[in-house]
Amino acid sequence: MTNLNDFSNKLKEEILKAKSIAIISHYLPDGDAIGSTLTMYGAVRKLNNAVTALRSDTIPTFLKFLPLIDDLILYDEKSKFDLAIILDCGDEDRLGSKKSIIKNSKTSFLIDHHNNNPLFANYNYVDNKASSTCELVFDIVKLMGVSFCKDMAFSCLTGILTDTNRFMYENSSSSTLLKAAELIDTGLDKDYLIRNLYQKTSKQSFLINKILVENTEFFFDGKFAFSYISNEDLNKVGATRDDLDDKISLIRDIEGVEIAILVEDRFDELKVGLRSKEYVNVSELARRFGGGGHNKASGFYYKSSIIDLKKDLMKEIEIILNENK
């Protein structure tokens, strides 16, 4: 469906008649994935108690302070539902092994804001101009006639803040800010939210910064910055993958850098994060490697060595930079 009002009405209709409802997002969840899941969970509970909020992966440490977080349970692939609501998932494979939820559900709804979404649910609402899935969920919840409680607002604002990088990305519109203001006006403790999201750097996260600086290389007159974090680097300072959250911004924010890439060793594959600052659409670069995302923030996974990855990236980035001269 392309009409948000029609989509919201249909979703509410299915929620009201369903005897079992599941809400789930992508694996390796971020603030928008968890935030949209918990926001929709809170809204659906007001319409139908037969709802389960699912997780397909571990919850990042920095999000464990969120209200209702303990209601998230691991998805059992044998479970079947009348209705599945899938959030913030750019394609079916981003559900990982949990994509069986689609065939295990009578009806599925997808809400997302990523580019080139293949629309894999029975009913799909995708708007790649939205700042976040949480912003879309905000609209849908209101169109369903459900009011925001503080817990729902807390989760929704978390997704908006994290996916806009505190309103610094170009996907932040005046509408985004107005919605954030409305969420704050529910009476949530904004200072508590900000402290937990942005003012709780662990010692291990701080020590990773030194390794990140040492591992960073610059190419093409400083327009491209590349860094790498190995499992040995993490073990050296006692860090976890949670401590790598948003480290790529430290590289992107260097003056003169247009494209920043941070690679994480995931044992059997490399997780490649891409960010750009002004004129490069890194989602185009990610798609060349089977990934995707947003214009200024994207990523993909790579199965070969770090040496091969760097060679492949250098070829593609040289083409992109030449195209943008």
Image (tube, helix red, strand yellow):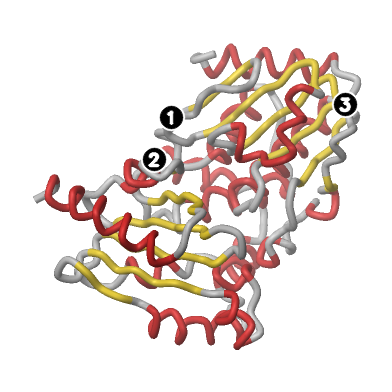
* Three-letter residue code for mark 1: Asn
The residue under the point 83% across, 47% down is: 74
Badge 3 local density, few (<14 within 10 Å), some, or many (20+)? some
Q: In which quarter of the image is residue 121?
A: top right
Q: Which of the two discs, 1 and 2, labels the residue nearer the N terminus?
A: 1
Residue for badge 3: 80
The percent position of residue 180, horizontal first and vertical second, equals 52, 47
- Is label 3 in a helix, a strand or a loop? loop
CA distance for labels 1 and 3: 28 Å
Q: What residue type is labelled 2?
A: Arg
Q: Which of marks 1 and 2 is in front?
A: 2
Query: Which element carries disc 2, helix, strand or loop?
Result: helix
Reply above or below: 310 against 235.
above
Closer to the N terminus: mark 2 or mark 3? 3
The residue at 26%/59% (across/down) is 314
- Distance from label 2 to label 3 (Cα)? 33 Å
Residue toward you, 189 or 7 = 7
In the rendered image of this protein, does residue 256 appear above or below residue 170? below
* Front-lying residue, 237 or 249: 237
Disc 2 packing (10 Å; few <14; some 14–19; many ≥20) = some
